[in-house]
């Protein structure tokens, strides 16, 4: 049985005209002999009535933090509405379609509300529908836990649903439809005309996604990679071939950089040994942060100081921990982390030097750097972000 999982993001199902385009993409798949399994996100983006952010804003932050189970129930509604409305569009053109919640589609998760992980997927209901020539239209972003309560998979989690189902059903491919032509060399909201990446390896796209390119969820890439299922990122609004993600990536030698991405809302934190000489907690500070679920990165430990960054949402928690331990520290708010990614960076001397030269020549202050085989990171001020990304993109990718 030739199965094709096709996932449509929030903007792809936001208006009736766009939902008609979704029907066309599914019809094309059927004409090619595939059995489509459709996954949908909640309709639209922030501000639109049934978007996930709009649903979340119906209750207070205090309620959300104290009632994660109820919050997941609320957040699940967006995808449920979307799947039923989408089925109506299929019925209008004579295609049999049936909506299923993630749990009804067989996705069973652990109990971590708001950020659940899959325990198992039972594809029986989906296969029964396909056998009766019915297109399953499955709500992305959610499952049931073993007690039968709704759970959600983390923001952007409909991509994860697509990969979970793709891997379990041994889909020929997983198609992720969105509002851009595919994976670009930089976020098109920041760089005017980034290049479309035609083919990219799981590894490189994982780095891009993990470091801020929200075009696809990094977990979705891991799952597809484990199942060795090719992913395709395509535009619902165009006929563009999109980006193919597989284990090989681009075979031809191109630029050493594959893409540039970024994360905003970073805070740089510094602790100096001199100011904390008699404080026993200075030595354990990274462990204490980990115990309190504060994730840190760009970590530099020197004999006389420790420097790292945190997300701004964790600042209050960090202050609380430091104050309780009477640790002296300083921090810089308003930072962004740029990641310059490419499998071919490995072994090429002078890439970091070139990056620093480009930024220095434009008076962009670099607060910190780090590097791995495939990625170079630079921490800069938010105010310089757009300029820095555009400059680096022009030098490395044009
Ligand atoms: P969907 O609702 O379809 O899941 P998302 O908003 O989650 O859509 O992801 C698509 C968006 O990702 C695009 O509109 C684009 O602005 C953004 N994006 C960020 N980085 C990139 C990139 N490198 N290539 C393509 N899109 C990117
Ligand atoms: N609707 C969910 C979100 O906004 C899941 C998704 O769109 O992938 O996070
Ligand atoms: Mg998304």
Image (tube, rainbow, N blue to C red):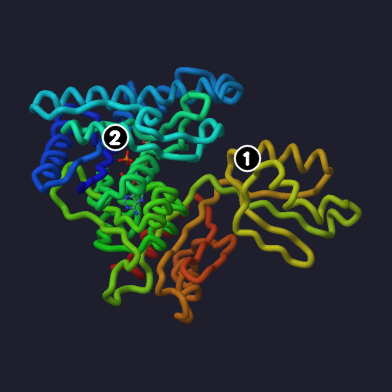
Q: Which residue is mark 1?
A: 314
Q: Quadrant of residue 93?
A: top left
Q: Of residues 6 and 360, which is closer to you in this image?
A: 6
> Which is nearer the N-term, disc 1 or disc 2?
2
- Residue 193 appears left or right of 319: left
Q: Quadrant of residue 5?
A: top left
Residue shown at the point (81%, 38%) measured from the top left: 324
Q: How many marks?
A: 2
Q: Compared with residue 148, is residue 192 higher up or lower down, i.e. above or below?
A: below
Q: Which residue is mark 2?
A: 126
- 3D distance between C-alphas at marks 1 and 2: 41 Å
Q: Position of residue 138 (x, y in %)?
A: 30, 32
| Foreground: disc 1 or disc 2 | 2
Residue shown at the point (80%, 48%) measured from the top left: 328
- Quarter of the image for the C terminus: give it: bottom left
Q: Compared with residue 353, is residue 240 higher up or lower down, i.e. above or below?
A: above
Q: Are marks 1 and 2 in contact (CB under 8 Å)?
A: no
Q: Compared with residue 200, is residue 216 higher up or lower down, i.e. above or below?
A: above
- Residue 240 appears left or right of 83: left
- Image quarter where ligand 2 lies: top left
Residue shown at the point (55%, 62%) measured from the top left: 366
């Amino acid at each position: 049985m030739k199965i094709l999982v096709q996932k449509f993001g929030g903007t792809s199902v936001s208006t009736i005209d766009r939902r008609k385009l979704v029907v066309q993409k599914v019809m094309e798949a059927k004409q090619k002999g595939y059995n489509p399994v459709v996954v949908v996100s909640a309709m639209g983006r922030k501000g639109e009535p049934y978007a996930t952010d709009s649903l979340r804003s119906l209750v207070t932050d205090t309620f959300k933090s104290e009632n994660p189970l109820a919050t997941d129930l609320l957040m699940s509604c967006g995808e449920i509405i979307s799947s039923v409305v989408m089925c109506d569009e299929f019925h209008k053109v004579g295609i049999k379609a049936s909506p299923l919640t993630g749990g009804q589609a067989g996705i069973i998760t652990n109990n971590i509300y708001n950020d659940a992980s899959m325990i198992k997927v039972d594809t029986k209901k989906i296969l029964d529908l396909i056998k009766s020539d019915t297109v399953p239209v499955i709500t992305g972003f959610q499952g049931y836990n073993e007690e039968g309560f709704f759970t959600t998979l983390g923001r952007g989690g409909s991509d994860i649903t697509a990969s979970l189902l793709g891997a379990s059903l041994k889909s020929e491919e997983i198609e992720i439809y969105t509002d851009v032509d595919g994976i670009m060399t930089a976020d098109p909201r920041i760089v005017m005309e980034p290049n479309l990446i035609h083919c990219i390896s799981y590894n490189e796209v994982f780095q891009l996604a993990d470091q801020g390119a929200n075009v696809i969820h990094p977990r979705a890439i891991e799952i597809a990679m484990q199942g060795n299922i090719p992913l395709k990122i395509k535009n619902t609004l165009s006929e563009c071939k999109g980006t193919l993600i597989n284990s090989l990536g681009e075979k031809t030698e191109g630029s050493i950089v594959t893409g540039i991405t970024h994360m905003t809302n970073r805070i740089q934190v510094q602790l100096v040994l001199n100011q904390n000489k008699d404080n026993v907690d200075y030595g354990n500070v990274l462990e204490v942060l980990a115990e309190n679920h504060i994730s840190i990165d760009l970590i530099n430990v020197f004999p006389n100081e420790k420097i790292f960054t945190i997300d701004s949402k964790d600042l209050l928690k960090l202050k609380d921990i430091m104050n309780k331990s009477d640790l002296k520290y300083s921090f810089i708010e308003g930072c962004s982390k740029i990641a310059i990614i490419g499998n071919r960076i490995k072994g090429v001397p002078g890439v970091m030097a070139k990056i620093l030269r480009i930024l220095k020549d434009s008076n962009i202050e670099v607060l910190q750097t780090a590097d791995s085989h495939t990625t170079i990171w630079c921490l800069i001020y938010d105010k310089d972000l757009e300029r820095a990304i555009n400059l680096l993109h022009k030098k490395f990718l044009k």
